[in-house]
Image (cartoon, coloured by chain):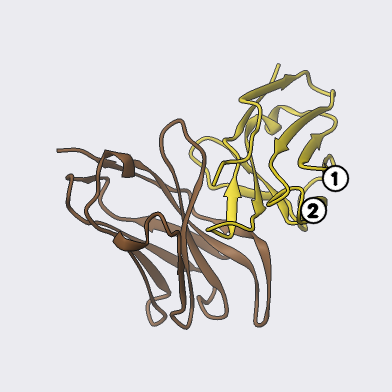
Amino acid sequence: QSALTQPASVSGSPGQSITISCTGTTSDVGGYNYVSWYQQHPGKAPKLMIYDVSNRPSGVSNRFSGSKSGNTASLTISGLQAEDEADYYCSSYTLSTTPWVFGGGTKLTVL
Amino acid sequence: QVQLQESGPGLVKPSETLSLTCTVSGGSISSYYWSWIRQPPGKELEWIGYIYYSGTTNYNPSLMSRLTISVDTSKNQFSLKLSDVTAADTAVYYCARRAGSSGWYGWYFDLWGRGTLVTVSS
């Protein structure tokens, strides 16, 4: 199946807000509220930031929020901090040959 | 806290078998689903397959004919074997835990290993 589509890169200044999009189809993002987001710093394990579209795991800053409209999910980071600079991946349950599909990842640069 | 660590050769020859192990530390492997996920250079993440602690498996159909995932609960480990590899199997391989346990499971991964790069080359 096709991967979810994410922008290759986004950037923002400290204190600003940024949004990363994740576009799929009605068979995945649009059809189910099972979108998750992961943060990965270089050389580190991916970390769950958002699950089921908009839920934050315990310990994740409330500066991170998720939403969905139609076939596009979004991760918004408010009050950007230098430590937010990382790669971000989205994932969704999919009614396809495999249970999960992933995005290609977005590199966030904090200017 | 629970941690996952992948281990195995970083270089595999074409046509040979890629073997990796994921060790679960700080917690039990029981009552969870454990997945392998990979990311070829410059490409998106790809789900490879999962195994339930009891041994039930589900594989990506595109890899099924070459893939075996097994679990050793006594060692708190699960393993991946991918046979007849080619350069297309070069990737960073991650092990990950599906969220939930004992009857309820989410459609996301709440714990990942750092990943290990496996290069297929002669």
Identify which residue, A79 or B105, lies in the foreground.
B105
Label 2 and label 1: CA atoms lie apart by 8 Å
Q: Residues within 10 Å of mark 1 (few under 14, many from 20)?
A: few
Chain identifier of the residue bearing label 1 in the image: A
Q: Kindly identify the amino acid type of the residue bearing the numbered disc 1.
A: Asn
Q: Residue furthest left?
A: B122
Residue at figure coordinates x 76%, y 56% from the top left: A32
User: In this rendering, does residue B26 appear at all?
Assistant: no
Q: Mark 2 touching mark 1, by CB under 8 A?
A: yes
Q: Colour of chain B?
A: brown
- Chain of residue at mark 2: A
- Earlier in the chain: of badge 2 and badge 1, it is 2
Q: From the viewer's perspective, is residue A110 above or below residue B120?
A: above
Question: Where's residue B90, x and y in %?
Answer: 32, 41
Q: Quadrant of residue A38?
A: top right
Q: Is residue A15 above or below residue B65?
A: above
Foreground pick, B78 / A73: A73
- Chain in yellow on the image: A
Q: Quadrant of residue A14?
A: top right
In the picture, measured across the screen, residue A19 lies left or right of residue B34, that is right
The numbered disc on residue A56 is: 2
**Taking B54 as reference, is A36 left or right?**
right
Residue B62 in view of the camera: yes
The mark closer to the camera, 2 or 1, is 2
Q: Which residue is mark 1?
A: A62
Which secondary structure lies at badge 1? loop
